[in-house]
Amino acid sequence: MKRILSTLIMVISISALFEASAQTRKNNNYDFFDTVVNNHNQIFPYSGIPSAIEMILKYCKVVNFNFYDLQNEWQNKVDGSFRDFDNRKVFGITFSQKFKLPRDENFTLDSLFQTIENELKSGKKVIISLQVDTGWSIFVIYKQTPDGEFVSYNKFGSHTIILRNTKEIVRKTNGTEIMTYNIPPLL
Amino acid sequence: MKRILFSLILVIATSPIFLLKAQTIKVDSCDFFDTVVNNHNQIFQMSCIPSAIEMILKYYNVVDFDFYDLQNEWKDKADGSFRNFDKKELYGITFFQKFVLPRDKNFPIDSLFQTIENELKSDKKVVISLPADRGWHMFIICKQTPEGEFVSYSKLGSHTLILRNTKEIVRKSNGTEIMTYSIP
């Protein structure tokens, strides 16, 4: 629990909290993913990966809001990674691990950002690993703002952690991995 | 900042976090308020009252998502209360402070809960003061679960705090104040 609180504090410290400049977009469009994430819980401290997958499944409406089977199976598994869901078909949706590259000056940041942008433009969300505190936490990129930044969500128990500076965080770590997904046409 | 983080920790401590029972509702319906709250920020440490009012105004589309005038005017005013917005009309919406009563065994909790339930049934949200740290933090009750509990949202900077045990918290504090509103 202490580790989780510490992580949250670091998440908060790296994001623009108070005195943050007011959001300037005038887009009042409803996004179903907001309802998904606010009704979802991360039920174990280390179940960030299956929690993110579950949110995607709920967003695609292939499971109900009370679906927590993946987290309940995962529990507090600490040696998991995106690899556990790479090329795995879950309720008709196939997940793919991407940008598994060394995080250094040669990391293809522009390509990563372009891939994310393309996914968002096609109406899909993107699962991303972001560094918070000394560890990595799993977020879902929800949208791109008019100024080009990505907004990412994850869960801390019932609470929704929202980062509006995703690109900035990724640049600081010289890259990161993402997961995309394919939806069959009939879904 | 430390105070805010400590407050958050206490808020969190009052809600079931990990190992909590998975939510059992099967509501896949959308609520525009989720988009409102996730796009909103609390921009000062002590501006939770105007922040809650702003979220209500955004919910009714009477202001845009970039509207922060009330918080910018309030800033870190520490002696404010619901009274500052009682009977005040903002962009056509009039706010009302209710249940300003001593928080003790005589507090009419059933009446408070019934009032909240009636507001939710009429598709309105309810601003509520809930204990956090040694003070109080403002939340907005957005819905009632099939089990009868109220789900409340608030902001911590950009983050969305979500309590699914609002009634339990209110009972522990022997009551609290709320703000309702009327729409023309």
Image (cartoon, coloured by chain):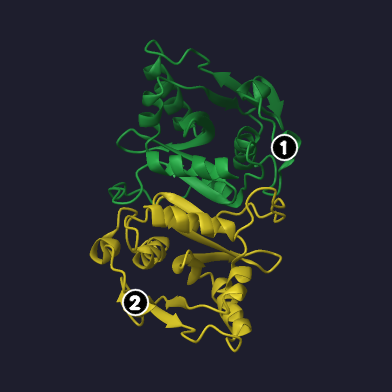
The reply to whether discs 2 and 1 touch (Cβ–Cβ < 8 Å) is: no
The answer, for residue B156, to whether it is visible in the render is no
- Tell me the tag on residue A130: none
Q: Is residue B146 left or right of residue A129?
A: right
The chain that appears yellow in the image is B
Q: Residue at x 53, y 41 (%)?
A: A154
Q: Which amino acid does the dot numbered 2 rest on?
A: Phe
Mark 1 highlights which residue? A75
- Tell me the tag on residue B85: 2
Secondary structure of the residue carrying tag 2 is: helix
| Disc 2 chain ID | B
The chain that appears green in the image is A
Residue B174: image quadrant is bottom right
Residue A46, x across and y down, in percent: 63, 36
Q: Is residue A112 left or right of residue B17?
A: left
Name above or below for residue B17 compared with residue A86: below
Foreground tag (2 vs 1): 1
Quadrant including the N terminus of chain A: top right
Q: Residue at x 39, y 42 (%)?
A: A13
Q: Foreground: B79 or B57?
A: B79
Q: Foreground: B56 or B52?
A: B52
Q: Which amino acid does the dot numbered 1 rest on?
A: Gln
Residue A91: image quadrant is top right
Residue A76, x across and y down, in percent: 69, 36
Please, which residue is most extreme toward the bottom here?
B106
Secondary structure of the residue carrying tag 1 is: loop
Query: Is the residue marked by circle 1 packed among few (<14), some (14-19), or many (20+) residues within 10 Å?
Result: some
Residue A121: image quadrant is top left
| Disc 1 chain ID | A
Task: Give the alpha-carbon distance from disc 2 to disc 1, as whole Å.
Answer: 46 Å
Query: Is the residue marked by circle 2 packed among few (<14), some (14-19), or many (20+) residues within 10 Å?
Result: some
